[in-house]
């Protein structure tokens, strides 16, 4: 079995991060923006794991576990915000969220 080179892993991680960044910038729906942030975090985690595999270092897996924990916390807070926006505005449009400043 042939090993996949580091450059292929990094290209995939960069593509995931770029797709997520484009989604955050272009979408106005809070739920889509949160999903795009998750894709960005997955790209970062993949890059961490690719470098760990390249160097033969298993301690990076702890950092990736922390990234996954942050992603889970982000989902919980983001869904709470989405529910609050839905109850207040009747939509999860980010343009309407700017009006919530008080």
Image (cartoon, helix red, strand yellow):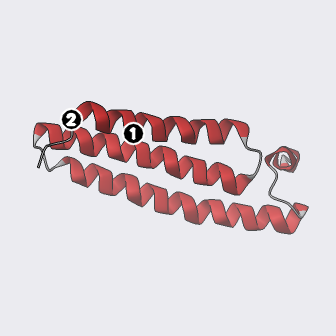
Residue annotated with mark 2: 5
Left or right: where does residue 55 sit relative to residue 64?
left
Q: Residues within 10 Å of mark 2 (few under 14, many from 20)?
A: few
Tally the numbered discs: 2
Q: Residue furthest top?
A: 7
Q: Given contact means CB atoms under 8 Å apart, are the residues at marks 2 and 1 in contact? A: no
The picture places residue 10, in percent across and down from the top left corner, at: 33, 34
Left or right: where does residue 83 sit relative to residue 58?
right
Disc 1 element: helix
The picture places residue 22, in percent across and down from the top left corner, at: 62, 36
Residue lying at 24% horizontally and 54% vertically, measured from the top left: 62
Camera-side residue of 77 and 52: 52
Residue lying at 46% horizontally and 36% vertically, measured from the top left: 15
Earlier in the chain: of badge 2 and badge 1, it is: 2
Left or right: where does residue 42 sit relative to residue 98?
left
Residue lying at 80% horizontally and 57% vertically, measured from the top left: 92
Residue lying at 39% horizontally and 39% vertically, measured from the top left: 13
Residue annotated with mark 1: 13
Which quarter of the picture shows residue 21?
top right
The picture places residue 85, in percent across and down from the top left corner, at: 80, 61
Above or below: residue 24 compared with residue 62: above
């Amino acid at each position: 079995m042939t090993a996949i080179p580091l450059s292929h892993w990094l290209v995939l991680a960069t593509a995931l991060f770029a797709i997520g960044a484009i989604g955050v910038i272009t979408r106005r729906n809070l739920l889509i923006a949160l999903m795009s942030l998750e894709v960005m975090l997955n790209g970062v985690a993949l890059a961490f794991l690719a470098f760990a595999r390249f160097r033969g270092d298993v301690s990076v897996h702890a950092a990736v576990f922390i990234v996954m924990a942050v992603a889970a916390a982000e989902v919980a807070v983001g869904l709470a915000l989405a529910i609050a926006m839905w109850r207040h505005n009747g939509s999860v449009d980010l343009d309407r969220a700017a009006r919530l400043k008080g």
